[in-house]
Amino acid sequence: MGWLTFGYFLSYIPYAMLVKALASGVTPLSSQPVSGYELLPAATLGQIAAMMLFLGMSGRWRYMRRSRIGGSRIPMAGRETLAAGFFASLIIGATTMNYTFAGVSILFMLLLMRGGVLILSPLIDVAGKRSVMKHSWLALSLSLIAISVALGDVNGYHLTPAAVVSVLIYLVGYLGRFEIMSRVAKNGVVATNRRFFVEEHVAAPVWLTVLLGAGALAGQPQLRAGFTRFLGTPAALGAAGIGVAYEVLFVFATLIYLDRREYTWGVSAWAFASLMSGLVGSFALAWLAGLRAPGSSQLIALVFGVGAAAALSCPSAALWWRTRGAGTACRVLFVCGGNTSRSPMAEVIAWAQAAEAGVAHAFRFSSAGVATPLPPHPMAPGARSALAELGLQRVPGRGIPRRHRARSVTLELCRVNSVIYCMTRAHCDRVIAMAPEAQDRTLRLDPYCDIPDPEGQSPEVYRRCAQHIQRSVRLRLCELADSYGACRTTLGRG
């Protein structure tokens, strides 16, 4: 997340500066102000070109689903990702327009836009039945204060009705996009998130081109000029550069949003990075081009905006300090009901796969059960036999724990483990009820379905359960290896 945030910060500075400079007529490409309507067609075409280059060179286009048309299988976006792309196109168009309005600074518009999304994020989490912690409501309050202070500087800006409408369109875009993303992605499944990323990525600039073209055909004169006369001017190169810069920041931003944690966590990093880039861009333009610097009220509002981002990120920062800052390995806890079958099998399988991949040093695996009180029973014979059939009698440095004794999940276990994988949704609910601060790192081991309890059933049921756990552990370890920079070559097999 740190590198994504830093990349977003670096890419947003040239984007915002270029839009504001062209709209203000202070570039060598054009001595006359260029309207947002004229800029958008060339900017969108620049983004499409950069998007095709990025997806082609990275090979990510292969993650798109395929539809058979005639005798060929053509990459296609799904219905929901097409809808997400539509809402993303509103965000792209409105963001660029927001920086072209006269009488407002980059920083002021950023405060309105980011403050609005900071307010939306905990509300979207509540609607999606995600628990929202006290720090999220604190951030919401700070965001409201930031917007109030910025709007109170009535002599420092001129907010037109068109600018207000553009900001509202921007927020509607985020509301729709986040709602769809919550349902079809953002679940910790790498393949699902990659497909959503690519399909929405392709759909968004295409949707924006269609919307702009419809406006031009409907008679909007500046949009018509943007598709015709303006494309032949030197300023069109600058506008295309806007699209290329937006393509870069769009990649970073989308990857931040797709993080499996709640929006109130990812949005904080995104908002902080963009507010800092807006501050740099605003004063750079004031110094280089003589544009008006942000007023003191806007700077005070920025402090509250940064405070909101800091409040949202505090729990995750504290977790990082406990688990990574101290130089410890990634601690993983597997949870089931009685800690005699599913979770101890997952623990053994995880040690085996990590050892085979050469990354066992990066992890610490353990298991527990949500049932209380929990007698210290050994691993069930059926579970031990199923592991033996998988060839896990001996694991380098580990093995089938002959002295395994069941134990209950405790608050301290929830606090010290980096991630908690439960066998069922009900187990997740029990863990979160015990330790609400662990909500964003408590997941089902199989993100698609519960892993049923084989207790008291036939050896074949235990065998199928062990195979189910093995597939799910491999998926989760691949994700963790990516996050912790470990080698995932062996983990990716099978």
Image (cartoon, rainbow, N blue to C red):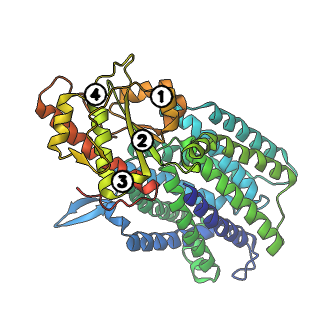
The residue sitting at 43% across, 27% down in the picture is 409
Foreground: disc 3 or disc 4: 4
Q: In this view, does 336 lie above or below 240?
A: above
- For marks 2 and 4, the one nearer the N-term is 2
The residue sitting at 84% across, 72% down in the picture is 290
Mark 1 and 4 residues: CB-CB less than 8 Å, in contact? Answer: no
The residue sitting at 75% across, 43% down in the picture is 147
**Which of 370 and 142 lies nearest the eye of the viewer?**
370
Helix or strand or loop: what does disc 1 sit on?
helix
Report which quarter residue 105 is drawn in: bottom right
Disc marking residue 28? none
Q: In this view, does 184 lie above or below 64?
A: above
Horizontal and vertical percent for residue 346?
Answer: 30, 39
**Which of 175 and 363 lies nearest the eye of the viewer?**
363
- For marks 1 and 3, the one nearer the N-term is 1
Quarter of the figure with the N terminus: bottom right
Q: Which amino acid does label 2 sit on?
A: Val
Horizontal and vertical percent for residue 76?
Answer: 31, 60
Q: Mark 2 points at which residue?
A: 332
Q: Is residue 158 above or below residue 217?
A: above
Q: Mark 1 points at which residue?
A: 432
Horizontal and vertical percent for residue 108?
Answer: 75, 54
Disc marking residue 340? 4
Q: Mark 3 points at which residue?
A: 478
Residue 448 seen in this snapshot: no
- For marks 2 and 3, the one nearer the N-term is 2
Q: In this view, does 327 lie to the left or right of 103?
A: left
Foreground: disc 2 or disc 3: 2
